[in-house]
Amino acid sequence: MSIYAHITGWGIAVPEKKLTNNDLMQMVETSDEWIVSRTGIHERRIAGANESTATLASKAALQALSNAGLSPVEVDLIIVASSTPEYIFPATACLVQDHIGATNAGAFDLSAACTGFIYALSMAASQIRTGAIKSALVIGSETLSRFVNWEDRETCILFGDGAGAFVLQASEAPGGVLTSALHSDGSGAKSLMLPAGGSRQPTTMETVRQGMHYIQMNGREIFRFATRVMAKATEKVVDQAGLKIEDVNLIIPHQANQRIIEAAARGLKLPTERFMVNLDHYGNTSTASIPLATYEAVEQGRLQPGDYIVLVGFGAGLTWGALLAQWSGPLSKTQRRVRHFGTLNRARALFRQVTRRIEGMIWGREEKEKPKSRK
Ligand code: ACO
């Protein structure tokens, strides 16, 4: 009996603060007309002081779990795809695991830039299809505003903050994630990168002085690359599934630039109406853009159970990929509101921290008494 990985829940979290093109005109030499005609973006969201990649991810995750009618303790795996994780380590996924009280879940981060959500969805679906796990939370979450150079007009107009999450669940009914195609070309690594803060170039006064802790991008190169790969990756997954492009009800692309999406539509000989676009009000939210667009497609009634969808994206790495799924909706007809026991989760975390300290006091003394290993 085959096992399928169904998308049964979806949720989002976006900061309240909006940054419009007019606001940007006060910050850099640009115009609303230039930004809209070159990108399609009108405004984007910016995280507040108390918001971070992990808090947005947790909020989106809880909404996705509510829609799926699944409790956090029933989640087996959490993957957070992010270009702006909370820390280099620990993984943002672990912070989400603790915050939502997913006490039975494994958790890790996945780094594939804007293609990260497609990579993560593909990995989680594979785990479900092998029978290793029964449910997964896949989250794309970003606070790109913290890595943008607000004096660089080529990049600061593009990016925004937000998070989106899917719940995947196992079922013997056919459907869900059917095929995926993941690609990379590291020779293009320098086209889009955050040069400092990693092991190659740890942060120093000098790297900060040179602004190497900000996103650096060759926009034209990325644009050419994106227009080359979007249609090809879409065709590949449609072909792998034994379908025709006409069978696909909705294509949900990475929301980077309206012109890139139009080029993909031309390449596939499809009208742009077949593509979900919401970059006008969120900008490029990297890994969060595809789940944010999917959520709005559901809200707008553009997705019905049984529909074929293609998610397709590209990003730094370079990476690109696509994934074909048959839309499912919640497995259980009775949706239940998932209660978030925030205080209880915090108390549990505190209890564990105290237990670890006590263990440290007991076992730490014994450690000291151990003979030193020979050199
Ligand atoms: N306002 C006004 N003028 C500007 C701005 C701005 N904000 N930014 C650039 N310009 C100027 C340039 O300086 C240039 O002037 P010049 O001709 O005097 O040199 C002119 O506008 C045209 O610049 P181009 O770079 O040719 O503009 P283009 O049409 O390529 O648009 C853009 C630039 C929007 C960045 C486009 O190249 C793009 O969208 N590229 C893809 C970027 C992308 O998607 N990145 C994310 C990848 S996903 C991820 O992993 C995060």
Image (cartoon, helix red, strand yellow):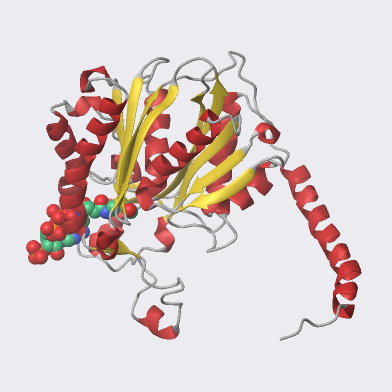
Question: Residue at 30% across / 24% down in the picture?
Answer: 250
Is 189 left, or right, of 220 in this rendering? Answer: right
**Which residue shows up at 28% across the image and 46% down it?**
256
Q: Does residue 32 show up?
A: no
Quarter of the image for residue 339 reads top right
Q: Position of residue 28 (x, y in %)?
A: 25, 65
Q: Position of residue 342 (x, y in %)?
A: 71, 43
Q: Nearer the viewer, residue 271 or 179?
A: 179
Quadrant where the N terminus is found in the figure: top right
Residue 299 is left or right of residue 261, and the answer is right
Vertical position of residue 227 compared to residue 246: above or below: below
313 to the left or right of 91: left
Name the one closer to the observer, 104 or 262: 104
Which quadrant of the view contains residue 62? top right
The one of 81 and 303 positioned closer to us in this rendering: 81
Q: Measured along the vertical axis of the image, is residue 217 above or below residue 77? A: below
Give percent across and percent down for residue 363: 88, 68
**From where the camera sits, is residue 84 visible?**
yes
Q: Is residue 332 left or right of residue 147?
A: right
Q: Residue farthest to the front?
A: 374
What residue is shown at x 40% (from left), y 58% (from top)? 145
Ligand 1 located in image quadrant: bottom left
Q: Look at 37% across and 82% down and name the residue there.
A: 209
Which image quadrant: the C terminus? bottom right
